[in-house]
C-alpha cells in the first residue's frame, strides 16, 4: 500500500513546489477534526484504512486501482476470446499484483458501509479520470 500512496504524495509535492517557486498560491491547509470516535478507534485497532474524508489525495491511487482492475479484466477477456495466455501472462501478473495491493481501496469503494468508506464523489471522479486515461 505504501507504493500506492506514493502516487499521491510525489505528484502533489511536486505541484506544490512548482506553484510555490512560481509565486502562485498553493492548496492551503484544511482543518479537520482530530476527535477519535469509538467506531473509528475500533477500525484503527483492526488495521482498517480510514477513507472517510473527501480528499484529492485519494484520487491518484483510486484511479490507478480502477485502471488496474480494468486492465486485468480486459486481459482475461482477451485470453478467453483469442487465447494466447503466454503473450499476456506477465502483463496479467502485474495487473493482478496491482489489484491485490489495491484491495483496501476496492473494499472502501464498494464493500464498506461505515463512515470510513471512500466518498462517492472521489469514486466517481476517479472513474471518469480512469476512463479518460484508459
Image (cartoon, rainbow, N blue to C red):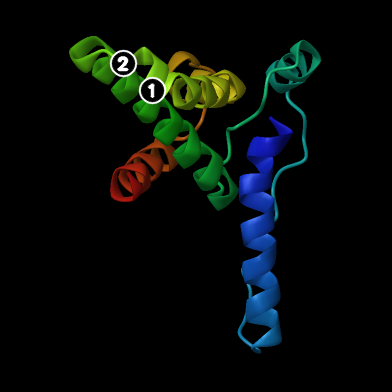
Count residues near mark 1 (Cα–Cα under 10 Å), then give few for <14, some for 14-19, many for 20+: few
Check disc 1 and report its element: helix, strand or loop.
helix
Quarter of the C terminus within the rendering: top left
Residue 81 position, x and y percent, is 19, 14
The answer to whether residue 104 of the structure is visible from this angle is: yes
Residue 121 position, x and y percent, is 40, 41
Residue 18, relative to residue 103: is it above or below?
below
In the picture, measured across the screen, residue 23 lies left or right of residue 125, that is right
Q: Please identify the quarter of the rendering in which residue 22 is found.
A: bottom right
Check disc 2 and report its element: helix, strand or loop.
loop
Q: Which residue is mark 2?
A: 84
The answer to whether residue 28 of the structure is visible from this angle is: no
Which residue sits furthest left? 81
Does the residue at mark 1 contact the one at mark 2 (Cβ under 8 Å)? yes
Q: Residue at x 57, y 22 (%)?
A: 97
Quarter of the N terminus within the rendering: top right
Residue 42, relative to residue 50: is it above or below?
above
Q: Residue at x 30, y 50 (%)?
A: 132
In the picture, measured across the screen, residue 89 lies left or right of residue 34, that is left
User: Could you say which is closer to the camera, residue 67 or residue 44?
Assistant: 67
Q: Residue at x 65, y 28 (%)?
A: 50
Q: Which residue is mark 1?
A: 87
The mark tally for this picture is 2
User: Could you say which is closer to the camera, residue 116 or residue 94?
Assistant: 94
Residue 12 position, x and y percent, is 63, 60
Amino acid at each position: 500500500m505504501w507504493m500506492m500512496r506514493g502516487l499521491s504524495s510525489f505528484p502533489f509535492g511536486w505541484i506544490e513546489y512548482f506553484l510555490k517557486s512560481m509565486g502562485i498560491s498553493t492548496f492551503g491547509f484544511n482543518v479537520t477534526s482530530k476527535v477519535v470516535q469509538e467506531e473509528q478507534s475500533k477500525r484503527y485497532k483492526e488495521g482498517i484504512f480510514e477513507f472517510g474524508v473527501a480528499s484529492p489525495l485519494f484520487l491518484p491511487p483510486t484511479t490507478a486501482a480502477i485502471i488496474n482492475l480494468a486492465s486485468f479484466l480486459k486481459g482475461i477477456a482477451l485470453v478467453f476470446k483469442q487465447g494466447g495466455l503466454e503473450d499476456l501472462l506477465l502483463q496479467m501478473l502485474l495487473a493482478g499484483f496491482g489489484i491485490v495491493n489495491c484491495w483496501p481501496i476496492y473494499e472502501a469503494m464498494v464493500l464498506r458501509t461505515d463512515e470510513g468508506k471512500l466518498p462517492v464523489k472521489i469514486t466517481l471522479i476517479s472513474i471518469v479520470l480512469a476512463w479518460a486515461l484508459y
